[in-house]
Each structure stands twice: as C-alpha cells, then as structure tokens.
Image (cartoon, rainbow, N blue to C red):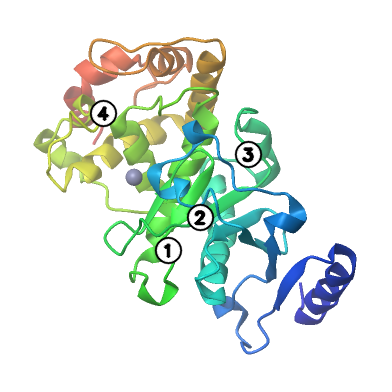
C-alpha cells in the first residue's frame, strides 16, 4: 500500500473509531524496508479488547501484560502489541513491525497462510484471529523474547535489542505457531523438547549439526528440559533430528503431525510414556504415516532406537 493510501485510510479510521490515540505513519522514513508497519494506539477502555488473561495460555513473560490498558494495532488488524504506557511509541511499533513482517514467512515454513492458521488454532485459545504481542518487563537482552499459546512477548526497549533480534523473534514465532497447531486444551506443551526446539531452530535458519557428527549427541533422549544436558551444541542436534524428518517427509507432513497431536488432545488423550513423551505426540507420530530416508514407515519407537543407524545410512 502506498503511503498516501495509508494516510487516507488512517484519517478514515480516525473518524469512524473515535478512540484512536496517535496516528502513526512513517512520514520521516523514505525507505519502506526500514520503516515501521503503520497502525494505531488504542485503549482497551474504548475497544473492550483486553489482553487475554487465561493463565493456561500464557507464560510468565506474557502475564505481565494482563493489566495493560493500551495496545498498538497494525493496519492489517491482525497484530496487537500490549504494554505499559511508560514505554515509547517506538517500542510498541518496533515489536508490532517485527511480528507483522515475520509471521507470514514463518507460516510458509509450516505450509500455511494466515487464514488457514487462524482456522487451525484451537477454539479454546483466546482471540484466535489475532497475533498478540506483549512488551514484557520480565525480558532482557539475555532472554529477549518468549512464546506462549496466546502471545509472543518481547523486551520493551527497542534501542537495546540484540543484533540478532530478527532471528530470535522468528524462532519464538515458530514456537507460537507449533504450540497453537498442536494444543487444544492441554495446559503444557505436548511436544518433546527435541522436536519443538529442532523445528524452531530449523525455521529460524539456525545452525544444524553436520550429519556425520550425529554420534556426538542423542537428541531424542531430551524429551523435557529436565532431560537436557547443558551442552550448547545440543540445539544443533535437535535441529539435525528434526531436519532428518523434514527431509524424508516434507514440511507439510510435519504440520499434519502437529494437527494430529491437537486432534489427540481434543479427543482427551492424556498422560505420558515412561520416557516422558505425551501420549498425544506418540499416537500422532505413529498415525502420521512418517517414513525414513528410504521411504519405510517410521514409528517414534524406531526413530528413537535406530536414530544413529538411520543417520549413518542417510549420507
Ligand atoms: Zn526455542
């Protein structure tokens, strides 16, 4: 959309909404690439659009936004960033712009477009047709962003964001998407740690361990954070395990897997295996018809027991 059109639309919305606080356009920036997404500040007192407060769908970072009275909504209407009025306009706009610009690319890695994603989200998620952001004071440069089912939280002070903020936001958006696709009513993630982190790492373009180094780590043993070692390079091995599945099956098969996990959750399948995987994930994995690199059926049990053999024979 041209800037003139955007301004005219902005004025129209001013007239019809009556609750706009600030017009936000990139007047001072001729370079679209570097400019912020345009949008409006709105008060929840005027719109009634509270930050989602269902605790099951939020993490600690996002809970900080529950009482915020103000949000910035992008012109597309799909991104809303909540936060304290103490933060600058730039802080709101920078976060909203990142979410607006990155979500389509992330969804395309899941073979989805925005309307399909909205459709696939659990109806128990509050506000399923918006991507909600939270400027959270609990975050810092060392933990800059986090994702829950209902919201993606970002550190408020845009001038202090780390240099790789775009990669981190992409990674957290991948978590946001995978959790929304795989949960119906579960209070916690139904995905094993290696799968969730491996998929988010691959989507964000983070390093993948070289296949010939597969013996260095057993990623599939890391089902929960309590199983994981402190080795930094484990994320590259989570990515390697995920990448193996994606190479053999294609990204769409893995989106179907997430849908099947959500279906199992909807059916009320509860509980975990002795090794910690949710029964929903195990049942979905085995029902998804996934194959190995030789196109032979791959159960979760076989993937776990034959992981190194499969990787060794795959290159
Ligand atoms: Zn992660």
Nearer the observer, 156 or 102: 156
Nearer the observer, 150 or 265: 150
Q: Is residue 186 left or right of residue 39?
A: left
Q: Mark 2 or mark 1, which has the lower sequence index?
A: 2
Could you tell me which secondary element the residue under label 3 belongs to?
helix
Give x and y (percent) for residue 199: 38, 40
Residues at circles 4 and 2 in contact by the CB criterion of under 8 Å:
no
Could you tell me which secondary element the residue under label 2 belongs to?
strand
Q: Crowdedness of circle 4 by 10 Å Cα count: few (<14), some, many (20+)?
A: some
Could you tell me which secondary element the residue under label 1 belongs to?
helix
- C-alpha separation, residue under disc 3 versus residue under disc 1: 21 Å
Above or below residue 121? Residue 108 is: below
Residues at circles 2 and 1 in contact by the CB criterion of under 8 Å:
no
Above or below residue 106? Residue 102 is: below
Nearer the observer, 62 or 291: 62
Residue position for label 3: 117
Per the rendering, the mark at residue 62 is none
Q: Crowdedness of circle 3 by 10 Å Cα count: few (<14), some, many (20+)?
A: some
Residue occupying the point 61% across, 33% down = 121
- C-alpha separation, residue under disc 1 versus residue under disc 4: 26 Å
Per the rendering, the mark at residue 166 is 1
Residue position for label 2: 134
Q: Mark 3 or mark 1, which has the lower sequence index?
A: 3
Give x and y (percent) for residue 283: 43, 11
Residue occupying the point 18% across, 23% down = 309
Q: Mark 1 or mark 4, which has the lower sequence index?
A: 1
Q: Crowdedness of circle 2 by 10 Å Cα count: few (<14), some, many (20+)?
A: many
Q: Give the quarter of the image for residue 238.
A: top left
Q: Mark 3 or mark 2, which has the lower sequence index?
A: 3
From the viewer's perspective, is the residue at label 2 or at label 1 nearer?
2
Per the rendering, the mark at residue 224 is 4
From the viewer's perspective, is the residue at label 3 or at label 2 nearer?
2
């Amino acid at each position: 959309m041209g800037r003139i059109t955007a301004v005219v639309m902005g004025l129209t919305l001013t007239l019809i909404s009556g609750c706009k606080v600030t017009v936000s356009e990139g007047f001072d920036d001729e370079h679209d690439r570097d400019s912020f997404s345009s949008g409006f500040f709105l008060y929840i007192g005027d719109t009634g659009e509270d930050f989602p407060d269902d605790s099951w769908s939020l993490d600690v970072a996002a809970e900080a936004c529950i009482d915020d009275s103000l949000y910035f909504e992008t012109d597309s209407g799909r991104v809303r960033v909540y936060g304290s009025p103490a933060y600058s306009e730039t802080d709101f706009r920078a976060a909203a712009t990142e979410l607006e610009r990155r979500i389509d690319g992330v969804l395309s890695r899941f073979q989805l477009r925005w309307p399909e994603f909205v459709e696939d989200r659990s109806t128990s998620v509050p506000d399923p047709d918006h991507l909600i952001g939270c400027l959270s004071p609990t975050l810092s440069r060392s933990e800059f962003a986090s994702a829950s089912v209902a919201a993606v939280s970002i550190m408020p002070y845009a001038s202090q964001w780390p240099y790789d903020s775009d990669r981190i936001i992409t990674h957290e958006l991948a978590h946001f998407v995978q959790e929304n696709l795989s949960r119906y009513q579960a209070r916690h993630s139904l995905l094993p740690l290696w799968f969730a982190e491996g998929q988010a790492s691959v989507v964000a373009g983070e390093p993948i361990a070289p296949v010939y180094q597969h013996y260095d780590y057993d990623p599939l043993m890391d089902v929960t954070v309590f199983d994981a070692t402190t080795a930094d390079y484990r994320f590259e091995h989570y990515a390697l395990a995920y990448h193996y599945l994606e190479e053999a099956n294609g990204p769409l098969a893995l989106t179907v897997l997430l849908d099947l996990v959500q279906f199992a959750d909807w059916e009320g399948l509860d509980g975990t295996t002795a090794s910690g995987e949710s029964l929903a994930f195990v049942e979905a994995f085995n029902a998804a018809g996934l194959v190995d690199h030789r196109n032979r059926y791959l159960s979760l049990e076989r993937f776990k027991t034959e992981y190194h053999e499969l990787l060794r024979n795959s290159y």
